[in-house]
Image (cartoon, helix red, strand yellow):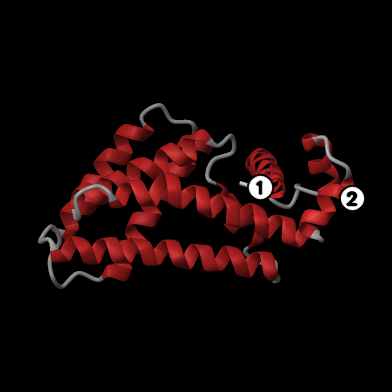
Amino acid sequence: MEKGDTTRHAILDAGLKMATQLSLESVTIGHLAKVTQMSKSGLFAHFQSKENLQIGIMQHAGELFAERVVIPALMAKAGIPRVKALVNNWIKWSSKMTGGCIFVSSSTEFTSRPGKVRDFILEQQEAWLDSLRRIARSAIRVGDFKKDIDCDQFAFDLYSLLLGFHLYDRMLNHEDTKKRQDVALDRLLDNYR
């Protein structure tokens, strides 16, 4: 990695951490310059605008998400083991961030704010749902799921379960959230077998 890439990576790591603690909107070039001990002009040279910085943070988060959640899950046996691996990886991902999953918080934050950042977040969410549909199709192929299931409904159901976990774990801080999530996941999977 070249020095410029290393610097950009460090900036994006700091920006992602800030976004998960505060919000994506709260990440400004000035605030991030202070945190990274860079000049505003030096940081501006990397991104040219707050909007590009926010997109860069979300793109960086997407790369980390693929590396830590999706790719390891794809190493698990296709079908139910892969679904469970994906869920466990997502929970670990979400739990390691101060404010929870950046994709959940930024999706809420930018839902009614048109622009490039919202469009980028929307593309990421669509790609995530497509991943869930593909995992359902692979579960059908290996015989873990019924052949006539609606893969769009599976993606909806599984993501809804994860969003529910996120609320219970992060906001409500229930002690039995993991246990309840396991029960809910087993019921969901039973519905598709």
> Does the CB distance between marks 2 and 1 fall below 8 Å?
no
Task: From the viewer's perspective, tell me whether residue 3 is left or right of residue 31.
Answer: left
Residue drawn at point x = 32 percent, y = 40 percent: 181
Q: Is residue 179 left or right of residue 90?
A: left
Decide which of 153, 123 is in the foreground and name it.
123
Q: Residue at x 71, y 44 (%)?
A: 7
Amino acid under label 1? Glu
| Crowd class of label 2 (few under 14; some 14 to 19; many from 20; radius 10 Å) | few
Q: Name the residue under label 2.
A: 41
Identified at 25% across, 40% down, the residue is 183
* CA separation in Å, label 2 and label 1: 20 Å
Badge 1: few (under 14), some or many (20 or more) residues near its Cα, within 10 Å? few
SS at mark 2?
helix
Q: In this view, does 92 lie above or below 123?
A: above
Residue 2 marker: 1
Is 4 situated left or right of 134 in this image? right
Amino acid carrying label 2: it is Ser
Between residue 154 and residue 56, name the one nearer to us. 56
In this orientation, which residue lies closer to the viewer: 62 or 102? Answer: 62
Q: Which residue is drawn at 84% across and 39% down?
A: 38
